[in-house]
Image: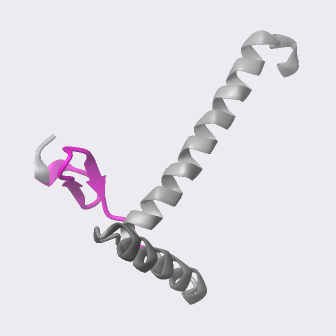
Amino acid sequence: MKAHETPAFSRVSRTGEDLAELRVNSPRHILAVIDSVAISETRASGKNVSRTDIVNRVLGIFVEHKIDEASLVSKALQDNPTVLE
């Protein structure tokens, strides 16, 4: 797919992973906690940890949980086809 054909605003990360932009409005108290965690981790590790790093980590955990959940449902349906009846 050529750059002008890509959906959304795609980018490629330093690791070669395909990226797209996510823009949302969030409650300030949530962003305050995310920023606090990012600052704390930056100080502790000596590496710059951004708000985006924290959000992607949290979203990654959420996605893994949903994949596990879907896998369990799929396996249960395969092992017990009468559930659908």
**Residue at 76% of width from left, 19% of height from top?**
77
The mark tally for this picture is 0
The quadrant holding residue 75 is top right
Q: Main secondary structure of the magenta part?
A: loop
Outermost residue, bottom side? 28
* Relative to 48, residue 73 above or below: above
Can residue 8 be found in the magenta stretch?
yes
Q: Give residue 52's position: percent from left, percent from top.
A: 37, 68
Q: In which quadrant of the rendered image does the C terminus lie?
A: top right
Q: Give residue 53's position: percent from left, percent from top.
A: 38, 64
Specify start and end residues of the magenta stretch as a single range: 4-23
**Residue at 80% of width from left, 12% of height from top?**
81
Can residue 20 be found in the magenta stretch?
yes
Tell me, yes or no, if residue 25 can be seen here: no
Horizontal arrangement in the rendering, residue 19 relative to residue 38 (left or right): left
**Residue at 28% of width from left, 53% of height from top?**
19
Q: Give residue 6's position: percent from left, percent from top.
A: 21, 50
Horizontal arrangement in the rendering, residue 80 relative to residue 35 (left or right): right
User: Front-most of 46 and 56?
Assistant: 46
